[in-house]
Amino acid sequence: MHWKNLFSPITHMDTKQVQSFIESHPEGTYTLLDVRQPGEYEKARIPGSKLIPLPQLLNRLAELDTEKPVIVY
Protein backbone atom coordinates (compact mmCIF):
# COMPACT_ATOMS: atom_id res chain seq x y z
CA MET A 1 0.00 0.00 0.00
CA HIS A 2 1.25 3.45 -0.83
CA TRP A 3 1.53 5.74 2.20
CA LYS A 4 -0.49 8.48 0.49
CA ASN A 5 -3.53 6.17 0.54
CA LEU A 6 -3.58 6.42 4.34
CA PHE A 7 -4.39 10.13 4.31
CA SER A 8 -7.54 11.96 3.23
CA PRO A 9 -5.93 14.76 1.28
CA ILE A 10 -6.94 18.35 1.42
CA THR A 11 -5.47 20.02 -1.59
CA HIS A 12 -4.40 23.12 0.27
CA MET A 13 -4.63 24.82 3.64
CA ASP A 14 -2.99 28.20 3.96
CA THR A 15 -1.25 29.36 7.11
CA LYS A 16 -4.36 31.05 8.49
CA GLN A 17 -6.48 27.94 7.95
CA VAL A 18 -3.93 25.76 9.74
CA GLN A 19 -3.68 28.26 12.59
CA SER A 20 -7.47 28.37 12.87
CA PHE A 21 -7.63 24.56 12.91
CA ILE A 22 -5.00 24.37 15.66
CA GLU A 23 -6.74 27.04 17.74
CA SER A 24 -10.14 25.34 17.45
CA HIS A 25 -8.96 21.80 18.28
CA PRO A 26 -7.48 20.71 21.61
CA GLU A 27 -3.84 19.67 21.60
CA GLY A 28 -3.56 15.91 21.21
CA THR A 29 -6.61 15.60 18.95
CA TYR A 30 -4.52 16.00 15.78
CA THR A 31 -0.95 15.43 14.63
CA LEU A 32 1.32 18.04 13.09
CA LEU A 33 3.69 16.01 10.95
CA ASP A 34 6.90 17.61 9.75
CA VAL A 35 8.36 15.61 6.85
CA ARG A 36 11.43 17.78 6.31
CA GLN A 37 15.00 16.78 7.10
CA PRO A 38 16.32 16.94 10.70
CA GLY A 39 18.49 20.00 10.01
CA GLU A 40 15.48 21.93 8.72
CA TYR A 41 13.44 20.82 11.74
CA GLU A 42 16.14 22.02 14.14
CA LYS A 43 16.28 25.47 12.51
CA ALA A 44 12.53 26.10 12.71
CA ARG A 45 9.45 24.07 13.52
CA ILE A 46 5.88 24.41 14.68
CA PRO A 47 5.71 23.69 18.43
CA GLY A 48 4.25 20.26 19.08
CA SER A 49 5.09 18.91 15.65
CA LYS A 50 6.40 15.39 15.11
CA LEU A 51 9.38 14.88 12.82
CA ILE A 52 9.32 11.96 10.41
CA PRO A 53 11.47 12.81 7.38
CA LEU A 54 9.70 11.93 4.15
CA PRO A 55 12.21 9.20 3.16
CA GLN A 56 11.44 7.43 6.49
CA LEU A 57 7.67 7.87 6.45
CA LEU A 58 6.73 4.50 4.97
CA ASN A 59 8.75 2.65 7.62
CA ARG A 60 7.41 4.79 10.48
CA LEU A 61 3.67 4.95 9.71
CA ALA A 62 2.89 2.93 12.83
CA GLU A 63 3.94 5.99 14.88
CA LEU A 64 0.90 7.91 13.61
CA ASP A 65 -2.55 7.62 15.14
CA THR A 66 -4.83 6.91 12.18
CA GLU A 67 -7.84 8.06 14.21
CA LYS A 68 -6.54 11.64 14.39
CA PRO A 69 -6.30 14.21 11.60
CA VAL A 70 -2.75 14.66 10.37
CA ILE A 71 -1.50 18.01 9.09
CA VAL A 72 1.60 17.37 7.00
CA TYR A 73 4.14 20.04 6.17
Image (spheres, rainbow, N blue to C red):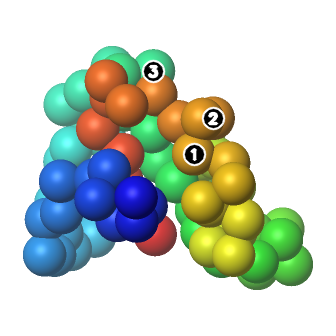
User: Residue drawn at (69%, 75%), measured in percent from left and top?
Assistant: 55
Q: Amino acid at mark 1?
A: Leu
| Closest to the observer, 31 or 56 | 56
**As drawn, is 56 to the left or to the right of 58?**
right
Contact, mark 3 vs mark 1 (Cβ under 8 Å): no
Residue position marked by numbered label 1 in the rendering: 61
Mark 3 is surrounded, within 10 Å at the Cα level, by few (under 14), some (14 to 19) or many (20 or more) other residues, namely few
The amino acid at mark 3 is Gly
Q: Position of residue 5 (x, y in %)?
A: 28, 59
Q: Above or below — where is 45 with respect to 66?
A: below
Report helix, strand or loop for mark 2: helix
The amino acid type, in three-letter code, at marker 2 is: Glu
Mark nearer the viewer, 2 or 3: 2
Characterize the local packing of mark 2: few (<14), some (14-19) or many (20 or more) Cα atoms within 10 angstroms: few
Q: Quadrant of the N terminus?
A: bottom left
Q: Mark 1, residues whose alpha carbon is within 10 Å: few (<14), some, or many (≥20)?
A: few
Tell me whether circle 1 and circle 2 mark residues in contact (CB < 8 Å).
yes
Task: For marks 2 and 3, give the CA distance.
Answer: 14 Å
Q: Which residue is mark 3?
A: 28
Are the residues tagged 2 and 3 within 8 Å (C-beta)?
A: no
Give residue 28's position: percent from left, percent from top.
45, 21
Which residue: 21% across, 44% down?
Answer: 21
> Could you say where residue 73 lies in the image, as x and y percent from the top left?
46, 69
Mark 1 falls on what kind of element?
Answer: helix
Of the two numbered discs 3 and 1 in the rendering, the one whose residue sits closer to the viewer: 1
